[in-house]
Amino acid sequence: MLFLFILLALFLLSIVFLVKKNNKKNSNSLIFSLALISVMVISVVLLIIPLTRIDDKLTIEKIKRTKLTIENSRKNCNETERAAILNKIIDINSKIAKMKYINSTFLGDIFVVDELANMDYLE
C-alpha cells in the first residue's frame, strides 16, 4: 500500500507542477512524463490486486476441499492411493509455503489474502 500511496503522491505533485505553468518546456515535458508513468503504474496495480485476490480465494477453496477429500480417503485406501494423496499434500504445502513467503515480502501483503498466508500445512 505504501508503494501505491507514493505513486499517487508523485502523480499529484506532477499535476501541481503542471498547473503552475512554468516557462521551461523541458521541465513541463518531464513532469508530464512522470504523471503519465505514475498513472499507468497505478492502473496496472489496481487491476492486478483484485485478480490475485480472486485467484487466492479459489486456491483457499481448493485447499479446503482437498483437505476434506484427503481426510475421507485416508480411512480406506491402498498403497497407490496413499502415494497419490502424498503427492497432492506435497503440492498443496508448496503452494501454501509460496504464499507465506510472498506475504512476508515488502509488497506481498497487498497481493496475498491473509487467510491463505495463515493457513496451516496439510499433514
Image: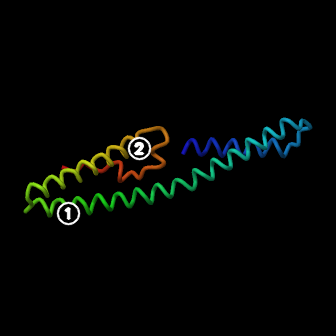
- Residue at image point 9% right, 60% down: 77
Left or right side of 99 for 77? left
What residue is rendered at 22% in x and 59% in y? 67
Q: Is residue 9 above or below residue 68?
A: above
User: Residue 113 at what x, y percent from top left?
Assistant: 41, 53
Amino acid type of the residue tagged 1 in the rendering: Thr
Mark 1 lies on residue: 69
Q: Earlier in the sequence, mark 1 or mark 2?
A: 1
Q: Which residue is mark 2?
A: 103
Q: Amino acid at mark 2?
A: Asn
Please state, as top left, top right, bottom left or bottom right, where the N terminus lies in the image: top right
39 vs 12, nearest the viewer: 39
Judged from this view, the residue extending furthest toward the right is 23
**Tag 1: Cα neighbours inside 10 Å, few (<14), some, or many (≥20)?**
few
Q: Quadrant of residue 11?
A: top right
Q: Which mark is residue 54?
A: none
Question: From mark 1 to mark 2, how far is it between C-alphas?
Answer: 27 Å
Q: Is residue 117 left or right of residue 120?
A: right
User: Which mark is in front, 1 or 2?
Assistant: 1
Q: Count of labels shown?
A: 2
Rendered location of residue 69, percent (x, y):
20, 63
For the point 57% across and 50% down, which residue is it?
Answer: 45
Asked which secondary structure carries label 2, the reply is helix
Q: Could you tell whether 47 is left or right of 74 in the image?
A: right
* Callout 1 secondary element: helix
Question: On screen, 108 above or below 43?
Answer: above
